[in-house]
Image (spheres, helix red, strand yellow):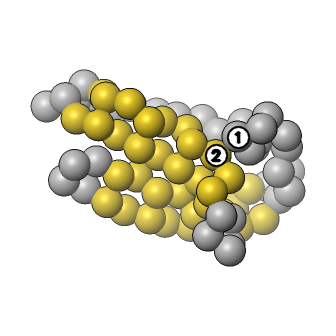
């Protein structure tokens, strides 16, 4: 079903780095590629980050490593 999806990236301090997706999406398989920039278009340093996926009925946060 069509629902609002928000995918965000945070640093280790919990500060928002980038909003990748923040709109309504139809059901089905989707993929998103993060280019390693923040919301200002600046490159971020390599290291550990968290990504959060939120919908009306689903909320999950996992860690990832950005390698340069």
Can the viewer see residue 64 in this picture?
A: no
Q: Secondary structure at mark 1?
A: loop
- Between 20 and 32, which is closer to the camera in this rendering? 20
- Between 22 and 52, which is closer to the camera in this rendering? 22
| Label pair 1/2, CB-CB below 8 angstroms | yes
Q: Which mark is residue 39?
A: 1
Please, is residue 6 above or below residue 67 in the view? above
Q: Is residue 20 left or right of residue 66?
A: left
Please, is residue 68 above or below residue 50 in the view? above
Give how far across and how far down residue 42 sits, in percent: 85, 40
Quarter occupied by residue 64:
bottom right
Can the viewer see residue 30 in this picture?
A: yes
User: Which residue is at 13% across, 31% downward?
Assistant: 1
Q: Which residue is mark 2?
A: 18
User: Which residue is at 31% across, 29% downward?
Assistant: 24
Give how far across and how far down residue 7 sits, in percent: 47, 46
């Amino acid at each position: 079903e069509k629902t609002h999806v928000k995918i965000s990236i945070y640093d280790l301090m919990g500060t928002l780095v980038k909003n990748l997706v923040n709109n309504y999406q139809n059901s089905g398989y989707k993929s998103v590629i993060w280019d390693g920039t923040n919301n200002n278009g600046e490159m971020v340093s390599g290291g550990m980050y968290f990504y959060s996926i939120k919908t009306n009925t689903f909320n999950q946060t996992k860690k990832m490593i950005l390698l340069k």
